[in-house]
Amino acid sequence: MSAFKTLDDLGDVTGKVALVRVDLNLPMQDAVVTDDTRIRAAAPTVLELSERGAKVLLLAHFGRPKGERVSTQSLSMVVGAVEKVLGKEVMFVPEIAGDVVKQAVGILRAGDIAILENTRFWKGEEKNDPELVKAIAANADFYVNDAFSAAHRAHATTEGLAHVLPAYAGRSMQAELEALDKALGTPEKPVAAVVGGAKVSSKLDVLKHLVTQVDHLIIGGGMANTFLAAKGVDVGKSLCEHDLTGTANEILETADQSGCTVHLPYEVVVSKEFAANPPSLRTCNVHEVAADEMILDVGPLAVEALSDVLKTCRTLVWNGPLGAFETVPFDAATVALAKTAAALTREGSLVSVAGGGDTVAALNHAGVAGDFSYISTAGGAFLEWMEGKELPGVAALSA
Ligand code: ADP
Ligand code: MG
């Protein structure tokens, strides 16, 4: 792993001004925060810096105001929710640079915390404008990035600031990078990857990268149908990207050359209509899918075989459900394999890392999210990491 500094590398910060990039892009309804997970993720870093006596200025974006002040997207709306999680008073500053911030810094005492305005109100944020970067940095002594979820963007507050101020990874960023390194950077072998979800097209780069990195690639979900079709299987009415069968074959070939074993379902759960517990529900061999049937999940025997694969592995990285898990009983394969992964992790024989919006929802649904070694909630950044891309926000911390 490329070296980055953490809060452990900071000396005495009493009275020093910290700019801390966090993720406060919170789900809201009628100006009320409906889920404070992201605030709780940022809390250890913010509280540590506060307890160590820094003046803490929080930087974050909210929504897509596209360089304009949009009052319904002001970060002033999240102050109450942040205060509640931190158990401390938090000041709001309606700017991110200039005299208003300077005055606020003058008022703050050591250990005080302020939230600056939505960084995306300024056009220079998404353009990574050096002038804006300089102006923000002028009011601070050092920069901490604790927003892995925004690290795939090279914006002023996610990347630019790291080049003009002493830069450190926050605790949540550090935990994410350490977990990801254990999963694909320097993993214990054999490594298995599970890739599921609806479409091959959304995860082509993920698949291409993984086949060169892992020992076992388990493909499930709708995307498995495209691979099955590529192998000449008639998948009936299933979700399938027939125009991508050539690409699927190329991926299988690369896997073969790289010594990666690809596991496709040989037994599937099908039905004629997509509904909960449909009357036409049945389980069959992949070669027995009728023309008017859809594959909606991996079959139970095939899942047992996949569980046996996981038992031989030391590391697992998982993105995408194995079936249409929002509708019963097409959650069965995902739940069963997730439970096996959780049990192996609890026993200490597997390091398990998972990420992706629907994947996290599916693992919560299975009741095992807490048993995985690490769950990433950083949608886009997690996928780009799975594609093997260097994330600009992370690279800047190591520069
Ligand atoms: P993530 O958000 O974790 O990256 P995706 O968005 O790629 O995951 O995929 C999740 C979606 O894939 C779910 O909505 C699920 O219903 C769908 N899906 C999984 N298997 C199938 C299938 N066999 N047919 C149709 N949709 C499927
Ligand atoms: Mg999704």
Image (tube, rainbow, N blue to C red):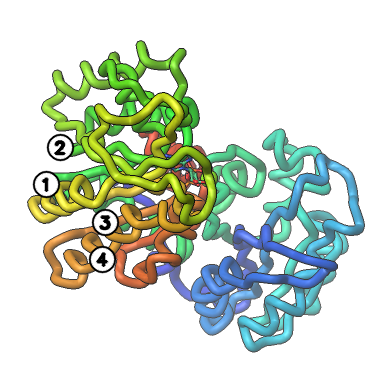
Mark 3 beta carbon near ligand 1 (under 8 Å):
no
Tell me: residue 393, above or below residue 335. Answer: above
Is residue 69 or residue 310 the one in the foreground? Answer: 310
Tell me: residue 194, above or below residue 179. Answer: above
Disc 4 or disc 3, which is closer to the eye?
Answer: 3
| Amino acid type indicated by mark 3 | Leu
Residue 122 picture quarter: top right
Is residue 274 or residue 320 the one in the foreground? Answer: 274
Disc 3 or disc 2, which is closer to the eye?
Answer: 3
Give the Cα distance between marks 3 and 1. 19 Å
Disc 2 or disc 4, which is closer to the eye?
Answer: 4
Residue under numbered circle 4: 342
Give the Cα distance between marks 1 and 2. 8 Å
Tell which residue pokes out farthest to the left in this image: 312
Residue under numbered circle 3: 337
Residue under numbered circle 2: 215
Mark 4 beta carbon near ligand 1 (under 8 Å):
no
Secondary structure category for the residue under label 1: loop
Q: Residues within 10 Å of mark 2 (few under 14, many from 20)?
A: many
* First-in-chain label (1 vs 2): 1
* First-in-chain label (3 vs 2): 2
Residue under numbered circle 1: 189
